[in-house]
Image (cartoon, grey):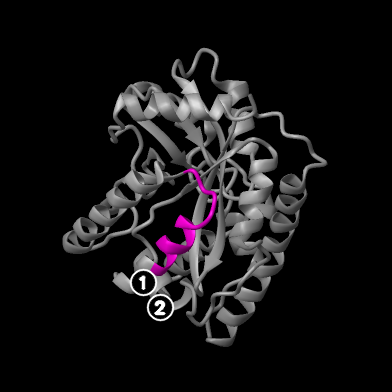
Amino acid sequence: MNIDLHCHSTNSDGTWSVEEILKEAEKKGVKGLCISDHDNLNGSIEAFEKAPGLFSGKLVAGIEISTVIHQQKVHLLAYFPTIDLPVSSNLIQNLDKIQNSRVWRMKEMIKKARALGMEVSYEEVLEEAGTGTKGDKQPTDVLSRPHLARVLIKKGYVKDFDEAFNQYLADGKPIQVDRFTLDFEQWIEQVDELNGIIIWAHPLHGHEEQEDTFQKIANTLKQSSIHGVERIYNYKGKYTISDEFEKWGNEHLDKLIEEQNWLITAGGDFHGNVGVIGELDLPETDWDIFIDQLYNRSN
């Protein structure tokens, strides 16, 4: 079944507008879609507003959030049974803090880049954030590393995204700066307060193919109350890993899924310039189980 519960619009670090994503998803025959922008629900809210007449499939409200487990960055996807989350909730309050911290982090990264001799400015990054495929503007509180990467590419300091991140912007690299976030247990608790579902996003990414690191993170999440894993993910479309590690990792994930009775989701991590949309197949049974649990957790 054509399902995609992980994509990004110009409400975070994607280059396509919500409207463009909805049209593409409809064209590709997507039956279930979530615009899961980083740290904010604006993409999902806009999708629900604009979907009539553009997208005939099932929309799910959600976000992507990041945390740290065993000194490794881990991404989580949070899905909600309603788009109308109370602004007074702990989750929404902390998402506001994160968005404010993105501006501070970007300015700090630019300072580091300039110290390395790179002539880049905050104004250039702001301008880059407005380069969606149809000039869609992004709010400054969702500035992220891909925006700075695109400036570095345009100015010739790196040749592509891989070099930008591998040399300068990835965790532990010279320009990277941490921003405010919560630990994974706090995220799970605050999503649970809103009857949401937590999914481990692209679980084979971020470990530099170190099997022991993957297993440590998996064991920690196994002991937590997350609900599932993004088992169907096109790593070749976003985070390239070796065929050998993907095979090994998926075998371990399948054991965990069976042991923990975890939900399974599919996501292309579409950003406009990277990732895929409408190209993944989630078994219809798994989709039905996901939808049933999402809308019946509070009952």
Q: Which residues are magenta?
A: 216-227
The answer to whether the residue labelled 2 contacts the one labelled 1, judged by CB atoms less than 8 Å apart, is: yes
Q: Assess whether residue 218 is covered by the magenta stretch.
A: yes
Q: Percent position (x, y) of residue 116?
A: 53, 86
Q: Which is nearer the eye, 121 or 60?
A: 60
The image quarter containing residue 31 is top left
Name the spot of residue 235 as percent of width and height, x first: 29, 53
Q: Which residue is mark 2?
A: 167
Is 106 left or right of 226, judged from the image as shown? right
Is there any visible trace of residue 267 in the rendered image?
yes
Residue positioned most to the top: 53
Q: Amino acid at mark 2?
A: Gln
Question: Which quarter shows the N terminus?
Answer: top left
Q: Residue at x 29, y 69 (%)?
A: 209
Determine the secondary structure under disc 1. Answer: helix
Question: In this rendering, is residue 238 above or below 169?
Answer: above
Q: Residue at x 17, y 59 (%)?
A: 243
In the foreground, 68 or 162: 68
Q: Amino acid at mark 1?
A: Glu
Residue at image position (53%, 59%) is: 147
**Which mark is drawn over residue 163?**
1
